[in-house]
Amino acid sequence: MPPRKEKLPKEDFRQLIRNYGIRFEGPVPPKVWPSQHKHHFQAIRKIDTIQYDDYKVNQLIPKERREDFRNRVNYLREKAYNLLDDVKANEATWRELELSILKRFDERVIW
């Protein structure tokens, strides 16, 4: 019988995922999206392709607004990375971050 492989600790496993850029498509791959909702999903996917280097020089967006967004993204990214590295993180801790993200939808966005 071959020797058993040792299981990686959760934090090492997550670090490998991050190092190799592994991304999960989610529960439903694009080829089986419902046709009546495909345009919504495609618009959301398109947002994922926006690069910060393009966004930060976009003159249509006021500089102060871009700086606010950058600060907010840095804050959320740092919180998410900390949760990924925290082996004790559970659904409740992720829900706290979710509230920070969803709070934005309650704020006025047209300035």
Image (cartoon, rainbow, N blue to C red):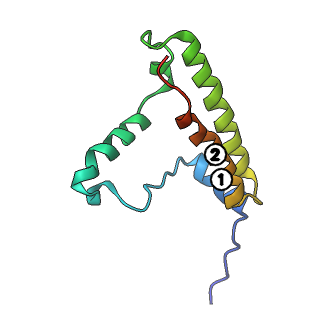
Q: Which mark is residue 79?
A: none
Q: Tag 2, which secondary structure?
A: helix
Number of marks present in the image shown: 2
Instruction: Answer few, some or many: residues within 10 Å of disc 2's Cα (few below 14, many 20 plus, some between 14 and 19).
Output: few
Residue 2 is situated, as x and y percent measured from the top left of the image, at 62, 85
Residue sitting at x 65%, y 59% = 13
Contact (CB < 8 A) between labels 1 and 2? yes
Q: Quadrant of the N terminus?
A: bottom right
Q: Residue at x 71, y 73 (%)?
A: 6
Residue that mark 1 sits on: 95
The answer to whether residue 53 is left or right of residue 15 is left
Residue 86 at x, y percent in the picture? 76, 54
Q: Is 88 located above or below residue 83 in the figure? A: below
Q: Secondary structure at mark 1?
A: helix
**Dot 1 amino acid type:** Arg
The residue labelled by disc 2 is 99
